[in-house]
Amino acid sequence: MLKPFKFIAAALALALAGPLAAQDGEPQAGGTLNVVIQPEPPGLMLGIVQNGPTQMVAGDIYESLLRYDSDLKPEGQLAESWEISEDGLTYTFKLRDGVTFHDGEPFTSEDVKFTMDVFLRETNPRTRTYMDRVESIDTPDDLTVVFNLQQPFGPFIGIFEQGTAPMIPKHIYEGTDFANNPANNTPIGTGPFKFGEWVKGSYIHLVKNEDYYMEGKPYVDEVYYHVIPDAASRAVAYETGKVDVLPGGSVENFDVPRIRELENTCITDKGWEYFGPLSWIWVNENNKPLDDVKVRQAMMHALDRNFAKDALWNGLGKVATGPLSSSTRFYAGDTPDIGYDPVKARGLLEESSYNGETIRLLGLPYGETWQRWAEAVKQNLTEIGMNVELVPSDVAGWNQKVADRDFDLAFTYLYQYGDPALGVSRTYMSTNAEPGSPWNNVSNYQNPETDKMFDEAALMASPDDRMAAYKTIQDMIVSDVPNLWLLELGFPTIYRCNIKNPVNTALGVNDGFRDVWIDRN
Amino acid sequence: MLRFILGRLVKSVFILLAILIFNFLLIHAAPGDPAAVMAGEAGAADEKFLADLRTRFGLDQPLYIQLWTYLKGAVQLDLGFSYRQQMPVAELIATRLPATLLLTGVAFLLSLVLGVIAGVAASARQGSWGDTIISTLALLFYATPLFWVALMASLVFSVWLGWLPGFGYSTIGAGYTGFAHVLDVAKHLVLPATTLGLFFTAIYMRMTRSSMLEVSRLDFVKTARAKGLRRSVIQRRHILRNALLPVITLAGLQAGQIFGGAILTETVFAWPGIGRLMFEAINQRDYAVILGVFYISGAMVLLFNLITDVVYVIVDPRIRLTK
């Protein structure tokens, strides 16, 4: 029997005021926000390009039906309220009245249906898999959308952030070649900022949407995203006052302690709860002796992850306890211990089938920190008696090697999207292990039992039932060590303290600067 | 002269073609393709998504067909389309080339003029204090890695002293026009152009100095002295003019090399030129952009070489151009 549950958003008034605004005095209108963007996004049409920088900029231009607070609770964005039927099959959204796109056309339920049913099904592989669970979408009137699901799908309420489900104007895109529509160069959404100008290689300029549906918002007049390719130069840009916000990962970790000491500088590690970026090392179980669970357990216990956290990440982030980030729903902290224990690691290695083979470790080509991390892991593994060889690559080469399974161990980190059914099961399901993609079950972990449980847990409508199921899954996976989990990554946002509210949702700066204001006193 | 130039231009077409084919094969030999990079950035791509991208980019075609399609376009000056940037490559390069030409042009002139002047000054009094100081500085500039100079210059002049902007092409959002804009760009140009020019200044200085000393020992210089010509006239008209020949050769060669240095300088100083465009394109395996930049920079190097040959004749009438 499914337990009934129901969400009605009564948070409209709160959302209008901005959750943190009250703490910092009265918001002041006006001013320019200067933000670093790295790397330069390939495009700003969020329905077509889904990389991080695109979402950061286009998150100001496009909006979805909901936002999520740091506990991943949904808040209304374009939807005023929503209701989930008792059987978990029907999701009814009531849209805000009076919302218009940047070209003045009204935003209606037809746009929602077109976006979810036509546009994103074609362009966004992640959204497509979620939409495969939807039987039909009804639009009884301009302000009501009803999603009818084939089966209950617990995480469905978690997909309405603008990276996964940006609302796209039907009147511009219907019947066109989406990928090559010239309108992609002048993105039109409903968001607080409109596209202004993009000087490739230099900056992207967004201007305030004067017709935004929230009275008085956004507060700032314009946003400049500065394209600065070198990490040290990005730090200089902040120090010399040219930019005010350094989103997570903008500067090298070793620069963070120095920059945070600068005058009028604030830092927060919030704003990553939805993505829950978790780093780990893929273990290629197609290659002997890595198919031996004892070898994997030995490697897991050999890794001094606290050292990596303190020395390489300057204490930022958290040591991972298993396949889920602690901010992801249904995280279980009390899984079997995988802590640093070189003595135990050596013992396990001796009992295992490891025979001095050379293990190829593929680092992640994302800059200094990752390079050093690969060296630290090599050292840890050498200390318990393994032969490790570091394999260098660039981003394209890394993608290819991982997709072709041409490695023994490979660093990676992936987003979890707030729910194990959205961002975790994909890496452990045996049905998702075909070579050719670097983001599926790359390790080729085969466990029919967890496969079945992942399938079942996604379909449970009751959160309690899901919690119980995911707890068992986490215990089983942690015992098998299909991957070597490293850290829940901390990507701190650094900003001047007089910039208020740069981060106030689970998506942080990726959610746009709707509530940001600049204190000029 | 005209026949010579025409002949060289015909040869250049074939050299350019060879550059394109060679680089096409080279970049395709590197692991990974643009579809994988773009799918990677999407975070959770599936096989179908990757296959769709490859079809859209024409990457599912055999390599020789891709090469043929590209060359057919290139001959008609169509450099293809960047799927990543959603723009024709020619347009993309056209928006970025002026910045690179400005940076490399200023760095080139600066280093050539400063290098030759310093070289002449040092050779005038061999072994003097002046010579030692100039030579030591030149050695220092020559030996210091470019990226380090760039970072230090940025730290000192931008962060500590606050005299010069540390990145970018102009002050974003300032809306300067006319002379104010020129001044603004010039301010932004100082650090990258000086950084890029330092290494070459050192080379020109050393080359000019040694060449001047060599020529000054030749018989015709003695003759000139015996004739009672003034020292400055001998230096300028007899020694310098002959000593410049190897410097010109070097300048012609380095006009091409300076593009290479621009990649690094443009990256550190966020200068929006084609060096950076190429660096990013290589990382993203944006084939059409990579080849487009090679095409343009190859054509420019060939052009500089042609100019060098013509300048030879002007500087040294003894040289006759033959096809």
Image (cartoon, rainbow, N blue to C red):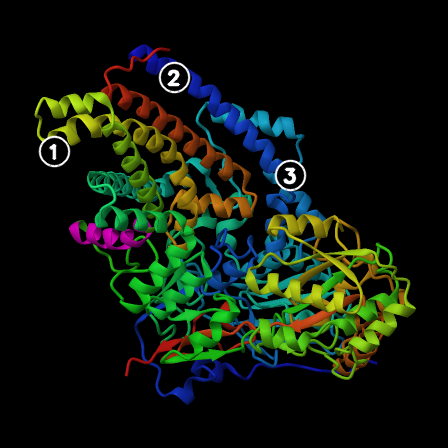
Observer-side mark, 3 or 2, equals 2
Say whether disc 3 or disc 2 marks the residue closer to the N-terminus: 2
Observer-side mark, 1 or 3, equals 1
Say whether disc 1 or disc 3 marks the residue closer to the N-terminus: 3
Residue B207's place in the image compared with A399, above or below, is above
What amino acid is labelled 1 in the image? Ser
Return the x and y of residue A453 as percentages of the image width and height.
84, 71
Residue A310's place in the image compared with B103, above or below, is below
- Label number found at residue B55: 3
Residue B47's place in the image compared with B59, above or below, is below
Q: Which residue is mark 1?
A: B232
Q: Around disc 1, counting alpha carbons within 10 Å, would you say few (fewer than 14), some (14 to 19), or many (20 or more)?
A: few
Return the x and y of residue A177 as percentages of the image width and height.
55, 43
Q: Is residue B186 magenta?
A: yes
Observer-side mark, 1 or 2, equals 1
Question: In which chain is the residue bearing label 1?
Answer: B
Magenta stretch: give its range: B179-194
**CA–CA distance in space, label 3 to label 2:** 40 Å
Residue A202's place in the image compared with B197, above or below, is below
| Of the pair A387 and A397, the residue shown nearer to us | A387
What amino acid is labelled 3 in the image? Thr
The answer to whether mark 1 and mark 3 are in CB contact below 8 A is no
Write down the quadrant of residue A464 in the picture: bottom right
Q: Around disc 3, counting alpha carbons within 10 Å, would you say few (fewer than 14), some (14 to 19), or many (20 or more)?
A: few
**CA–CA distance in space, label 1 to label 3:** 69 Å
Q: Which residue is mark 2?
A: B8
